[in-house]
Image (cartoon, grey):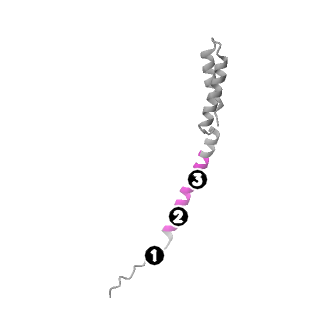
Amino acid sequence: MINPRMLDEMSARVSSLLAASPAGEVEKNLRVVLSGLFAKLDLVTREEFDVQREVLSRARAKLVVLEARLAELEARAPTVKPIQADSGQK
């Protein structure tokens, strides 16, 4: 659920900023905090997103085919006049 590449990039930036100071412990703590924050956001991985996008794409394609088929069948069906209710007047 957490994008490791993004965490690594953020960690590298923090490391470069704090390299001159004794802040190695800060970096570790920050990494833990960020990991926890990202875990709480209920994010999906890029792979999961791509899979779902492909599933949706296939579903849309099937829908287009089915709509065209339905239109074809409706066009071929004989026209049926609706039955009108008797108004009760003679």
Q: Nearer the viewer, residue 76 or 10?
A: 10
The kind of residue on which mark 3 rests is Ala
Which of the marked residues, 2 or 3, is nearer the chain's N terminus?
A: 3
Which of the marked residues, 3 or 1, is nearer the chain's N terminus?
A: 3
Quadrant of the rendering where the N terminus is positioned: top right
Residue in the image at 35% along x and 82% along y: 87
Residue at the far top in the pictured view: 20
Residue 80: numbered disc = 1
Q: Is residue 48 above or below residue 71?
A: above
Q: Percent from the top left, x then y, of residue 38? A: 61, 33
The kind of residue on which mark 1 rests is Val
Q: Is residue 36 magenta?
A: no
Residue 59: numbered disc = 3
Q: Main secondary structure of the magenta part?
A: helix
Per the rendered image, the range of residues in magenta is 53-74
Q: CA distance from mark 2 to mark 1?
A: 17 Å
Query: Mark 1 falls on what kind of element?
Result: loop
